[in-house]
Amino acid sequence: MSDPSAKLPDVDSNTFWTLIADARAGVPDPADCCAVVERATTLLAALPPASIVAAQQVLWDLMADSYRHPLWAAAYVMNGGCSDDGFDYFRGWLLTQGAEVYQAAVADPDSLASLEVVQAAAESGVEFECEAALSVAWDAHLLATGMKLPEDAFTIRYPELDPDWDFDFDDGEELAARLPRLAALYEV
């Protein structure tokens, strides 16, 4: 994203992750998800409107890819509970952490226990949510064009959740068996 004015016919996941990396590099504290979102919105708004619309679909494809019970269980542990909306906001936070953290967490949610910010939050009680991340393309389009995103700007199809993970997330023994590092960190 070194030249945000470059014409991009489409935005794919690599472009999206570059945008997030550039946003993280452009803020004093990359752990501040609101600052990352604000910077990403500004960078995205510099692109052609069609690219902004394409970014909206990429964002929701990533949201769908991360809609998994194991990750929801991790969010439940880390945030001391996690509703449907809370899981969306947690995944918004996860997007602001960049491709490497996102991909590792989707593959193995227990990997989140190795992040310094997560370790610090286990003691302080800070929750991991970033609702603003879900509207980065919406806000960028509004900033760039003065108009809302087209109503048909994206589709989302959440996959079925894994029935093997359909258990009561208040079951500390089960969580400790499935997410041992997070359970230990958060003393579940």
Image (cartoon, rainbow, N blue to C red):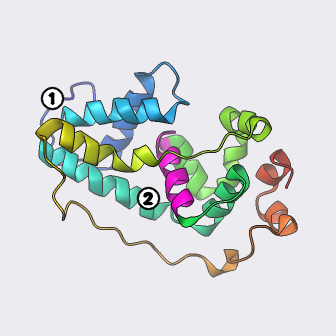
- The percent coordinates of residue 116 (x first, y second) are 69, 32
The extreme top residue here reads 28
SS under mark 2: helix
- Name the residue rendered at 20%, 51% in the picture: 53
- Which part of the image, by quadrant, shows the N terminus? top left
Count all numbered tags in the image, as a single digit.
2
SS under mark 1: loop
Between the C-alphas of marks 2 and 1, the distance is 26 Å
- Name the residue rendered at 41%, 56% in the picture: 62
Q: Is 23 placed left or right of 47 in the picture?
A: right
Tell me the tag on residue 63: 2
**Vertical placement of 58 versus 40: above or below?**
below
| 163 part of magenta stretch | no
| 86 part of magenta stretch | yes
Tell me the tag on residue 5: 1
**Vertical placement of 94 versus 116: above or below?**
below
- Marks 2 and 1, the one that precedes in the sequence: 1
**Vertical placement of 105 versus 143: above or below?**
below
- The percent coordinates of residue 145 (x first, y second) are 12, 40
> Main SS of the magenta segment?
helix
Q: Which residues are magenta?
A: 85-99
Query: Is residue 9 visible in the rendered structure shown here?
Result: no
The extreme bottom residue here reads 163
